[in-house]
Image: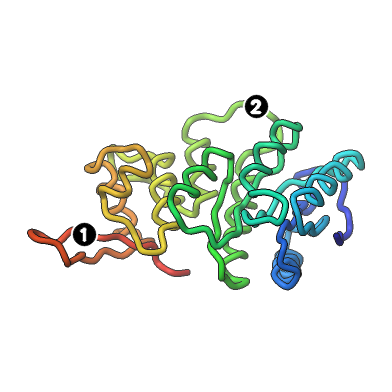
Amino acid sequence: MSGGGRATGDPAHRPIRVLVVEDDLVAADAHARYVARTPGFTVTATAHSRAEAVRALDRAREADAPVDLILLDLYLPDGHGLHLCAALRAAGHTADIIAVTSARDLATVRQAVTAGVVQYLLKPFGAAALGDRLGQYARYRASLGRDGEALGQDEVDRALALLRGTDRTSLPKGLTAATLETVAAALRTAPDGLSAGAAAEVTGVSRITARRYLEHLVTTGHATREPRYGQVGRPELGYRWKSE
């Protein structure tokens, strides 16, 4: 396990501390280098197993320099990453988690959301894709402020939209930022795209509601729309997140 320099001081003016958890040594090194090159972030440690991750987090907390963000591979040699998420919360660790994984099934995506994963990045990816997620996360943290006071609903919606990269100064009547980021997250993690029906099933909204949000993502340039053939009757529309 290896670590980077430790940053201390006012949380608003220090780098975001990141723990990289990845069992593949080459991938772990690449992820750490990507993070280190991103302004506003620093790598505190690299762990190659669940046990190493727990030790790194405990050491950081004891040193009064807790980890802010974990880049977490879900397939670890000593346990699934989602089980680690639950164990960390039970132990009082509050670091946010970005899943960095090849797991593409929607059941895993749903479990990740339930476990508190704030973003989901599919392998393989390049520095630009990771940099985009880190930038969204940094803007999300900055939008929350420092005074600990409760935010208004508009501020909460904006913070969540910043985290998902779906921020807009205004939305069509009847659409909310919170539901938009939920639909966008589902579409972003579906490698083969989603129909309105599939999006509704994943997100828990109605099919009509899901289609409204999907169409909005198409209108704003985040998604594409195309007919899906192969079944009897009218072809179904499929939606796919645009590559970044």
What residue does disc 2 label? Answer: 149
Amino acid bearing label 2: Glu
Quadrant in which the N terminus appears = bottom right
Q: Amino acid at mark 1?
A: Leu
Is residue 62 rendered to the left or right of residue 76?
Answer: right
> At x 54% / y 42%, what residue is drawn?
159
Q: Residues within 10 Å of mark 1 (few under 14, many from 20)?
A: some
Residue to which mark 1 is pinned: 237
Question: Residue 60: x, y in percent?
Answer: 86, 45
Of 220 and 101, nearer the camera is: 101
Q: Residue 56: image x %, image y %? A: 84, 49
Residue 241 lies, in percent from the top left, at 39, 62
Could you say whether the residue bearing mark 2 is in a helix, strand or loop?
loop
Image location (x, y in percent) of residue 134: 63, 58
Q: Is residue 14 above or below residue 229?
A: above
- The front one of 183 and 136 is 183
For marks 1 and 2, give the CA distance.
44 Å
> Residue 98 vs residue 191: left or right?
right
